[in-house]
């Protein structure tokens, strides 16, 4: 989940998360903990949205970008193992689902 959050933030430069309720209500607490950990490690920066207090602006830091670059070889290796195990069609389905989550955010 942390890697997904980092990837979303890296691709979009920032993302918004609801602080309460919403479609991802079941994972809201987990997501909050992950965001707190990423922020504590200096990988993301969060600040409140003055126009909507239910939203939090999340931005990846330079340290977060550096971590993603360093993790890229391992990520490619994992993708290759997945492709070998489930096939390209299933891997494409997974990537489509993850992209849909990234595009639609947490609303």
Image: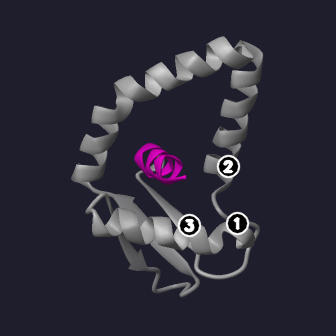
Q: How is the image coloured?
A: one colour
Residue 86 appears at what percent x and percent y?
73, 18
Residue 10 on the magenta segment: yes
Residue 48 appears at what percent x and percent y?
43, 81
Question: Which is more N-terminal, label 1 or label 2?
Answer: 2
Circle 2: element type: helix
Horizontal arrangement in the rendering, residue 96 relative to residue 67 (left or right): right
Q: Residues within 10 Å of mark 1 (few under 14, many from 20)?
A: few
Number of numbered discs visible in the structure rendering: 3
Residue 61 appears at what percent x and percent y?
27, 56
- How much space separates mark 3 and mark 1, taking CA atoms? 13 Å
Q: What stretch is highlighted in magenta?
A: 1-11
Circle 1: element type: loop
**Which residue sits at x=72%, y=80%?**
21
Q: Are marks 3 and 1 in contact (CB under 8 Å)?
A: no
Residue 72 on the magenta segment: no
Task: Give the label on residue 31, or none.
Answer: 3
In this rendering, is residue 106 above or below 79? below
- How much space separates mark 3 and mark 2, taking CA atoms? 14 Å
Circle 3: element type: helix
In this rendering, is residue 82 above or below 70? above
Question: Mark 3 or mark 1: which is in front?
Answer: 3
Viewport quadrant of the C terminus: bottom right
Give 51 or 13, whichever is nearer the viewer: 13
**Residue receiving disc 2:** 101
Residue 49 appears at what percent x and percent y?
47, 80
Give 39 or 48, whichever is nearer the viewer: 39
**Residue receiving disc 1:** 107
């Amino acid at each position: 989940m942390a890697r997904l959050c980092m990837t979303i933030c890296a691709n979009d430069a920032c993302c918004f998360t609801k602080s309460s309720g919403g479609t991802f209500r079941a994972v809201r607490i987990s997501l909050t903990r992950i965001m707190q950990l990423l922020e504590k490690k200096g990988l993301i920066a969060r600040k409140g949205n003055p126009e909507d207090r239910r939203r939090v602006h999340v931005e990846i830091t330079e340290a977060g970008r550096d971590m993603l670059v360093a993790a890229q070889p391992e990520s490619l290796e994992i993708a290759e193992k997945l492709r070998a195990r489930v096939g390209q069609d299933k891997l494409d389905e997974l990537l489509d689902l993850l992209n849909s989550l990234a595009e639609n955010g947490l609303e």
